[in-house]
Image: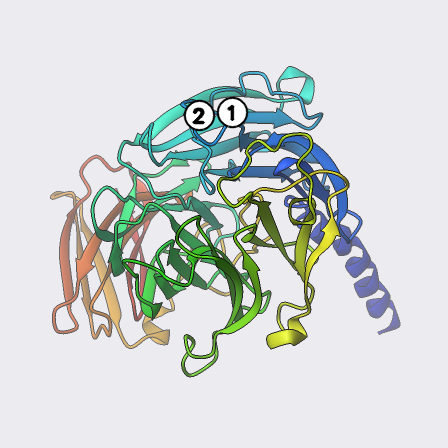
Amino acid sequence: MRHSKQIISLLVLFLIPVLTSAQNRGNVWCFGHEAAINFNSGFPVADSSSVISRGSCASICDTLGMLLFYVSNDTVSVTTTQINGGKVYGKNHQLMLGGDSINSQGWYYELVIIPVPNSNDLYYVFSIGVTAFYGIYYSIIDMSLNGGMGEVIQKNVQLQNFKCSDGLTAIKHGNGRDWWVFFRRWDSPNNTYYKYLITPTGISNVMMQSIGSSTSNGFARMKFSCSGDKMMFMTLTGLLEYYDFDRCTGLLANPQTIFPEQSNPINGFFWSSQFSPSGNLFYTTLISLPGVTDSCFLIQYNLNAPNIAMGADTLAIGSLINNMSHLKLGPDNKIYMSSVYNNLQTISYPYPDTVYSIYNSYLGVINSPDSLGTACDFQPYSFYLGGKRTYYGLPNNPDYNLPALVGSPCDTLVSQNELAGAAAVGSLHVYYHPAWEKAFINASNLKGKIGMLLVYDMQGKVVHSEPLRIQNGYYTRDLSMAGFSNGMYLVVLATEKERLTKKLMVE
């Protein structure tokens, strides 16, 4: 017994560095006006970068927490005509080879970095076009090139060509390896979420899900909880909607409207948001705009309250001159808030060398974000940036640390779920007819009404997806498998109430 305990202790000691190393990709933030923060010591340390961006930026480290590269939109001014002002900087803060002219325009949530699954060197930079260069694009960076300094080897590959809302977002798939990339369109009123699944084999066909309230807002932000099972959607003009989220299927469910969208907000405009680490509390900032509102707010919501909207708690009130803007959870489980200095007419962007104030030289900090009310210990302008300055934005980094969903149908890269029939009321039967090259899909006793039919290959790539509708608890589909390679596939029927899975052999 004594020897067993010693072996277990040694295993724990060996595992600690491994577990820690997986939690460092988001440890360096580069943002604002040459600002940066390094969290590798366990607490934030002010640093510097080459960013000069009023909003859009993202950064990524290796698994040891060492900065690899970052991307930002460094437009010349707020009114610039330069619409592909995105730049990629290497770890030494020099422009990366091929790192200029990434399509983005100087908005706020246009850029996100995703590691290519199963690769040590390749990374995607996704970007969106909001008011020009419409659509969503990707660029690929190879960090093995240029002596380890990296090179952009593909640039601005277009996936869609419609207007996208400012609010590009990503979250890890339930298998802990792949990624979902989320965005919305805004050229017409709609309630559709667009998603791409990123796997080792590339980028899937776009998947669409229509759910929740309709909007045509050009500022539409999505924030996922730290556990990944909840999502909050918000628009500039006041829509705040709370969803359940399935990381395996990418499906949203059970929308709960906390606030409906307004045609003319009088108390400020929703700008940024953040879940607390436990997911029980939620924070938003409402900004003011010249000639529209005079105050800005930091607000806390108790998501366990019987009425979330009525339980909103205003933690701080600012003015037009010190707009409280972006919220972001740090690796230390504190929430950081940027502010932009406003001269009561326009944002001075880029800041002249003489424009320094407490508003743009510090970040606010929520020290205990899981505590209600004033116990959350919000300290405005309490983290000094070492002589650097902020604008609206902090890095739009996803949660690189989010683990696989242990025990779920997709916690392994080759799903082995055959227990849906035992765990759920509904049942799913799939039969393949080789002569007809069709899969006959039948499900019964279903609780849900709408959902998605998805087919995965054994590498976790979605090779087919379509919306489905349940009639009286039944669903039937004759799915053509013509053109599919021989081999094992996974058929998933997911509704807002259940998720059923069966294996399918094509031969």
Number of numbered tags placed on the structure image: 2
Q: Disc 2 marks which residue? A: 80
State whether residue 118 appears in this view: no
Neighbor class of circle 1 (other Cα within 10 Å; few <14, some 14-19, many 20+) is: some
State whether residue 447 appears in this view: yes
Q: Is residue 48 above or below residue 383?
A: above
Residue at x 16% of width, y 49% of height:
479
Instruction: Estimate the x, y position of residue 451 in percent, counting from the top left.
Output: 25, 61
What's the mark number on residue 159? none
Left or right of 117, for residue 379: right
Residue at x 47% of width, y 41% of height:
108
Which is more toward the observer, 235 or 296?
296
Residues at badges 1 and 2 in contact (C-beta under 8 Å)?
Answer: yes
Q: Is residue 43 above or below residue 278?
A: above
Mark 1–mark 2 Cα distance, whole angstroms, equals: 6 Å
Instruction: Estimate the x, y position of residue 480 in percent, counting from the top left.
Output: 15, 44
Left or right of 8, for residue 449: left
Secondary structure of residue under mark 1: loop
Q: Disc 1 marks which residue? A: 76
Amino acid tagged 1? Val
Secondary structure of residue under mark 2: loop
Tell me where residue 136 sits by quadrant.
top left
Amino acid tagged 2? Thr
